[in-house]
Each structure stands twice: as C-alpha cells, then as structure tokens.
Amino acid sequence: MTLYLELNMGAAGDMLMAALVELLPEPDAFTAKMAALNLPGVVITRERSVKMGIVGTHMRVVARGEEETSEDVNIKAPVNVIAPHTHADGTTHTHGDDGASRSLTYNDIVHTIEHLPLPPKVVADALAVYKLLGDAESAVHGAPPEQIHFHEVGTLDALADIVGVCVLVDMLGVTDIAASPVHVGSGFVRCAHGIVPVPAPATAQLLTGIPIYSGKIRGELCTPTGAALLRHFVTRFGDMPPTVVRKIGYGMGSKDFDALNAVRAYLCDGDDEDSPRDAIVSLTCNLDDMTPEAIGAAVDLLLKAGAVDVFTTPIHMKKNRLATMLTALCRAEDEPRLTRLILKHTTTLGVRASRHERAVLHREIVTVETQFGAIRVKVSRGYGVERAKPEYDDVAASSAAHGVTFSEVYDAARRAYASI
C-alpha cells in the first residue's frame, strides 16, 4: 500500500498522527499501544472533531498536565541554547533561560526512545526523526545538540507525536509515502527567543530541498516536528498521481482558519505494493575546456559526496566544439551541496536542475557460498522483475586469489544464488 499526504494546511505532528489513525481498521488499537509505552508524564487521547461540517480526528496530547498550544511557543519543542560560561577560577557551567528543572537535553530524549518497548524499525525511525530535529535546531542556534535544552512540556508533546507517527506507519504497513508541496503559512510567530518569521527557523532548515509555499493564511501551519516527520518518511513531493484510493483520513488541527485546518491522508493501491517510487534531481552542465582527467576527478568527487549516479555524455556545442555533458543524479536534499561542488570543481558557469519521479526496485545484498569462497550478490525485485548480479569487487578478488577467470567466479555465484 502507498500513502499520499495532502498538506494544503501544512503539517504538525498531532495532525499527521490523527490523519493516520483514521486509516486504521481499529483506531483503538493504536491508543492502547501508545498507552502501553508509558511515555513519562504523557497522556494521549483520540477525539472526534468537526470542522466546516467535515468529521475527522484530533489527537490530544497532555504532558505533565499541560497541553501545548501555539500561543505558548512557535514549535512543538521550543529550545534554549545552553551557552558555556567560564568563571575567573576556570570552572565552567551552562545555564539557560528556563532552568534545568523545565528542560530536557537531546541525550535525555534519545535515551527515552532507545528504551521504548517497540520493534527495532520503529525505534530507528523515531531516533532518525529526532536527529533531524536536533540537527536543525543545532544549525539554527549555532551550537552542538548537547548545548541545546528542550522545554519539558513541548518536548514530551513532540516525543509523543514522533513516536506515534512512527508506530502508525509501521501498523499501516505502507511501503511508499508521497505528499503535496507544503503550505507553511505566513506572518510572524512568537518563540522562546522572540518574534520570528514563518516558517520558523528550524522548520525552514528542515524543509530545504522540499517544495513549499506561503499562501495568504496568517499563522504557523508547519511545525518543526511536522517538517522532521515529512523529511524522514516522504520520498517525493508533488501532485497526486493517478491511483486507487482505499481509505481517507482527516487529521484536524486545534486552530480554525478560513480553510479547513486538516491534513488529509489517502491510503492507496500502488503500481506494485512492493515497489516504491521516489524523487530524483538531475544536475547537468556542459564542459568544453576541461581535460578528461579533470572531469574524471570531478566525477569521483561527486560520487564520494553522495550522488546517486554520475555520468558523462559526448556532445557538440556552438562553433562545433567537442564537449562533455556532466550529469549528476542526486536526492532533493543533496541538490544545493552537490551544485556547489560542481561549480567549484568544474569550469562550468552554470548548473541546470530538473526533477523527476522514478520507479525503483527494492535492492538487497545476499552472500552466497561458492567453491571460490563467499561472494556478495545484489538482488533487485519489484514490478514483476527479479534479477541477481554478483558484486564486481568480490568476483575480481576471488578470481585473482584462485587463479581462475572472472567469468568462472561470476557464473558460480549466479548458480549458488539460483539454488537458494
């Protein structure tokens, strides 16, 4: 199954959680599972909500007897930078605006998540989302995560939202998540350090490389918690493709606007339930004044920097000059960084970017035993296709070690895989 999120009114953790709850055949199973986690000081309840005549769900999260609202702070987990202060005697301590009794550290949160009685995949997802959130706050405040303290009530609220969404994705068993461009709202919002523009700095940091727009609605529609969840789970952003919708969920926000304040989630049939699609960016430039060796060095650099693939194409430019077109395929979040590398390490004066949706096969590495030793085999499946390809490095090394041809080892590995 696939999931499409309609984010016309942004995204907050509680709204995403509420929308996904509605897609479950038995929503009470989720609330029972969350209650069994015994998150410290957190109570989660599912409530029926009606906005503009539309019935949906609102998830109420109460932490330490308080419910976080947007009037309190600008995000689900407001922060204070705990700056080191050195005294004349050389001793050093840190302090923040709210005091230690009202805050939690990044390590506190990680420790809590790691000890939750949940499947390893769900724990790994929750840790990955919170790392995104911590890295964003760290970048915005110019301080390492350990020097950032999160307001206690806001952090417990965000923790419940993040864990809840990760649990729901696991319960729904979706293999592919897509979403519309993100409506972030407009205007200004008050946070722990003063008044800042919408989207809040941490939200803006998390949404780099993701299509967003402001619109005319005044207010913060996308929170850092929502942005971190989208960045982790959503593989592509764009219009909803032709699909068969099986169920629709409405996750209602706490505020009322001129438009329906909800995340709408569609549970759909995919082209192939085991074969997802994702988004890819193609970066290209034309080079007519670089040596082949220099171009090769740039290719190697881009691959090491995280490009999905890099290749060159011979072309003719104006005045019949022979040239090379360099193409680097990358994920959306890597586009700014790889663009800078291309401009720095080649002679081009500009880089073209185009965005594509691609169908991808699931890939895994399987190790097989042959008479020439263990060989890794890359297995790809999906869309009715299955293929297996022995890893070049393993085959070449085994060929040299045993004094046989590459083809002999390659064929032995293929036969070994076929016999599994």
Image: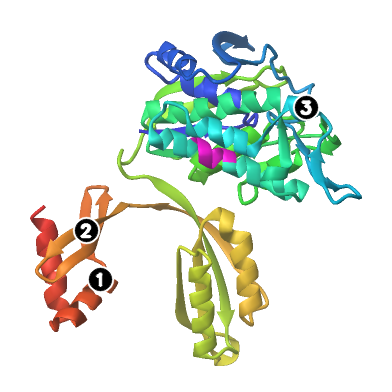
Q: Is residue 125 left or right of residue 379?
A: right
Q: Where 125 sits versus 399, above or below?
A: above
Q: Where 164 sits versus 242, above or below?
A: above
Q: At which x and y percent is residue 77?
A: 69, 31
Q: Where 289 sits versus 4, above or below?
A: below
Magenta residues (range): 126-130
What SS does tag 3 mark?
Answer: loop
Q: Residues within 10 Å of mark 3 (few under 14, many from 20)?
A: many
Name the residue that disc number 1 marks. 394
Q: Amino acid at mark 3?
A: Val
Q: Nearer the viewer, mark 1 or mark 3?
A: 1
Inspect this view and state whether residue 133 appears. Answer: yes
Picture quarter containing residue 76?
Answer: top right
Q: Is residue 173 left or right of residue 351?
A: left
What SS does tag 1 mark?
Answer: helix
Q: At which x and y percent is residue 362?
A: 31, 50
Residue 128 lies within the magenta run: yes
